[in-house]
Image (cartoon, rainbow, N blue to C red):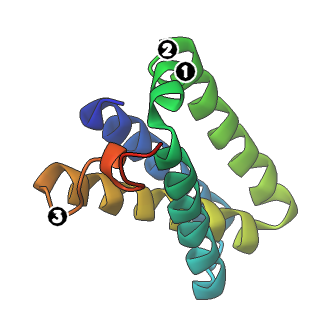
Amino acid sequence: MGTRTDGALALVALAAFAGLVVLVDASLSIGFLLVGGTATICFELLAARDPAPVRDYWERRPVQFASLAVAIGGAAIGARIAPEIALSLCCGATVTYLVFLALLWMGVLPPLETWWGSDS
């Protein structure tokens, strides 16, 4: 998973989410921001268990762009139904992911392959 590509896609998503927050004049909930961030961390822990197949699948451009479209589309639908919850979850997850990528890039976090030891 290319950190630059992942970061760029996450920034595009975050910009769309922020635009939706402004468009619907939503307030963000700290609780749901934390739930979104926790979900991101849980996903990364699961993906780190066997990162090769996740990487192989994710590195396909159609998968990346479809995921981005689904995330933005889902956030747009959520912004109409429950803006505070949906947009808080999306923003919390995306900001957490960007921080996660930054920590990997800076070397603060070790590569995913090392998280679960050599027995995976």
Please state if 84 lies on the left or on the right of 114 as rendered.
right
In this rendering, position of residue 26 left or right of residue 2? right
Q: Earlier in the sequence, mark 1 or mark 3?
A: 1
Question: What is the C-alpha distance between the residues marked 1 and 2?
Answer: 6 Å
Residues under numbered marks 1 and 2 in contact, where contact means CB atoms less than 8 Å apart: yes
Q: In front: 15, or 37?
A: 37
Q: Amino acid at mark 3?
A: Val
Residue 19 visible in this rendered orientation of the protein: no
Along the polypeptide, which appears first: circle 2 or circle 3?
2
Return the residue at label 1: 57
In this picture, is 5 found above or below 99? above
Mark 1 crowd level (few <14, some 14–19, many ≥20, 10 Å Cα): few
Amino acid type at image mark 2:
Arg
Q: Residues within 10 Å of mark 2 (few under 14, many from 20)?
A: few
Name the spot of residue 108 as percent of width and height, x first: 16, 64
Q: Tell me what residue is drawn at x 75 percent, y 58 percent.
A: 79
Residue with the mark numbered 3? 108
- The residue wearing badge 2 is 60
